[in-house]
Image (spheres, helix red, strand yellow):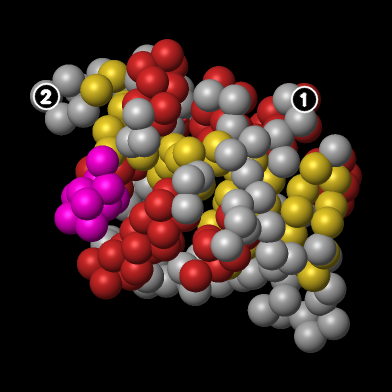
Amino acid sequence: MNLAYKRAIIKLSGEALSGGKGHGLDDDVIDDICKSIKEVHNLGLELAIVVGGGNFWRGRSSEKIDRSTSDSMGMLGTVINALRLQASLENLGVDTRVQTAIEMKAVAEPYIRRRAIRHIEKNRVVIFGAGAGLPYFSTDTTAALRAAEINADVILLGKTGTDGIYNKDPNKYDDAIKYDELSYIDILNQGLGIMDSTATSLCMDNNIPVVVFGIDDPNNLIKVACGDNIGTKVKG
Ligand code: UDP
């Protein structure tokens, strides 16, 4: 199998780690995802992972908490997920480092760009926790930011409950059409909710290709890393 990319950011939503349950962590599902991550890493793909936190908390989960505090809670949720992924990957023999955008040195390294790149060059998988460390941001935007910072060729955006980008919700409309390819501006103009507009703009402005694919079958990660025509490719 030949890789289509040299260096990638894998973005996993928190929901992906919950095995479709929407909340918490599913050990078996996480192990299956990590086995696929190990496989693409063994093929030679340089990797960093940005993980979401929606399986614990999202900034917009409660109107009773001010948004900045609520977003801090969401960012802490991503750190739980980052440590959980690290545990599975290390159990599988993959060398990893967690770096967090909010300093918590007792549990992980702080995010330092040059150090992250060095880890990747030394064949370690870097897992980015705490998003970008800023309220009002998402982990999709973090994936775009980190991809630009570490010169990744692509963002592999693993989604649950879908296998790509459709013109309308395929769970509601039988005649929904899946796109094989799409431009960033199409996503913005058509208001397709697959990525938030900040993340989409950042990818557009920095020419970072994104492949949206279904992670419910973790083998899909290997397929997209090898350039198979599944999912939806987003570029300029
Ligand atoms: N978050 C944030 N700043 C960031 C990244 C995340 O404030 O840079 C917060 C935000 O509240 C978000 C939550 O963390 O709702 C979880 O992240 P996200 O919703 O992106 O996770 P996912 O939907 O991918 O599981």
How much space separates mark 2 and mark 1, taking CA atoms? 36 Å
Horizontal relation, residue 227 to residue 217: left or right = right
Question: Going by the picture, which residue comes out furthest to the bottom?
Answer: 174
Q: Is residue 76 above or below residue 170?
A: above
Question: What range is drawn magenta here?
Answer: 85-95
Identify the residue position indicated by label 2 in the image: 106
Observer-nearest of 72 and 188: 188
Question: Going by the picture, which residue comes out furthest to the front?
Answer: 1
Q: Position of residue 77 (x, y in %)?
A: 30, 43
Residue 205 badge? 1
Q: Specify the amino acid type for callout 1.
A: Asp
Horizontal relation, residue 103 to residue 142: left or right = left
Question: Going by the picture, which residue comes out furthest to the left?
Answer: 106
Q: Residue at x 77, y 25 (%)?
A: 205
Quadrant occupied by the C terminus? top right
Q: What secondary structure is found at the residue carrying circle 2?
A: loop
Q: Residue at x 46, y 40 (%)?
A: 47
Q: Residue at x 35, y 29 (%)?
A: 122
Q: Quadrant of residue 107?
A: top left
Quadrant occupied by the N terminus? bottom right
Q: Is residue 142 above or below residue 61?
A: above
**Within-10-Å neighbours for mark 2: few <14, some 14–19, many 20+:** few
Q: What secondary structure is found at the residue carrying circle 1?
A: helix
Horizontal relation, residue 177 to residue 70: left or right = right
Let me know if residue 108 appears in the view: yes
Q: Quadrant of residue 58?
A: top left
Q: Specify the amino acid type for callout 2.
A: Ala
